[in-house]
Structures are given as C-alpha cells and as structure tokens.
Amino acid sequence: MGDIDLQIIDLARDLLITTIVVAGPILIVGLIVGVAVSLFQALTSVQEQTMSLVPKMLAVMVVTLLILAPALQLLTDFTSRVLDRLVDFGLS
C-alpha cells in the first residue's frame, strides 16, 4: 500500500473514533433511559406512549447540552486535521 492509502485509512479511523466519542454518550444515555422506562412500564403495567418518549427525549437533550462544548471542540480539531491533510492529497 502506498503512503496515500495509509493516510486515508488513518483519516477514516480518526473519523470513526471521533464519531463514536461524540455520539456515544448520547446514545448510551438514550439506551439506559429507554430500558429503565420500559422496565418500569412492564412492572407497573402502565403502557402510556408519552411515558416512554418524554423521559428519553429529556435525557438526550440534557446530555447533548452538557457535552456540546467538548463535542464541538473535538469536531473542530478533527476538521482542522482533515483540512491540514488536503495538501498531502493534492487537493489544495
């Protein structure tokens, strides 16, 4: 494999890691709250649709607001790394 191929693979790996780090906490909180609400609904026989949607939505919104600044910093760093590598690929 050439040097450019290794750089593209490294860039793709960096993209996947950045995506997991940014989206992971939000998805994990949504999963945990969803399982907890489903367990509560199964135990109490309450099958209200809004009861499953509202807590999940609120939890995801709170976590998104809490990690917004660090996530934007990660995305900014990733974008600058991508733009720095454009010269290596001959696109700039």
Image (spheres, helix red, strand yellow):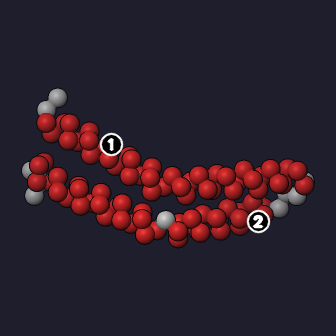
The x and y percentages for residue 15 are: 34, 49
User: On the rendered image, what quadrant is the N terminus found in?
Assistant: top left
Q: What residue lies at 75% left-to-right and 60% top-to-bottom?
A: 52
The x and y percentages for residue 11 are: 26, 46
Residue 16's place in the image compared with 52, above or below, is above
Question: Separation of disc 1 and disc 2 at Cα?
Answer: 39 Å
Tag 1 near tag 2, CB within 8 Å: no
Mark 1 secondary-structure assignment = helix
The x and y percentages for residue 75 are: 35, 61
Relative depth, front residue between 51 and 13? 13
Q: Residues within 10 Å of mark 2 (few under 14, many from 20)?
A: few
Amino acid carrying label 2: it is Thr
Q: Quadrant of residue 37?
A: bottom right
The x and y percentages for residue 17 are: 39, 47
User: In the image, which disc is placed on residue 50?
Assistant: 2
Q: Residues within 10 Å of mark 1 (few under 14, many from 20)?
A: few
How many numbered markers are drawn?
2
Per the image, the residue denoted by label 1 is 13
Q: What residue lies at 48% left-to-right and 55% top-to-bottom?
A: 23
Amino acid carrying label 1: it is Arg
Mark 2 secondary-structure assignment = helix
User: On the rendered image, what quadrant is the C terminus found in?
Assistant: bottom left
Single out the residue that lies furthest toward the right: 45
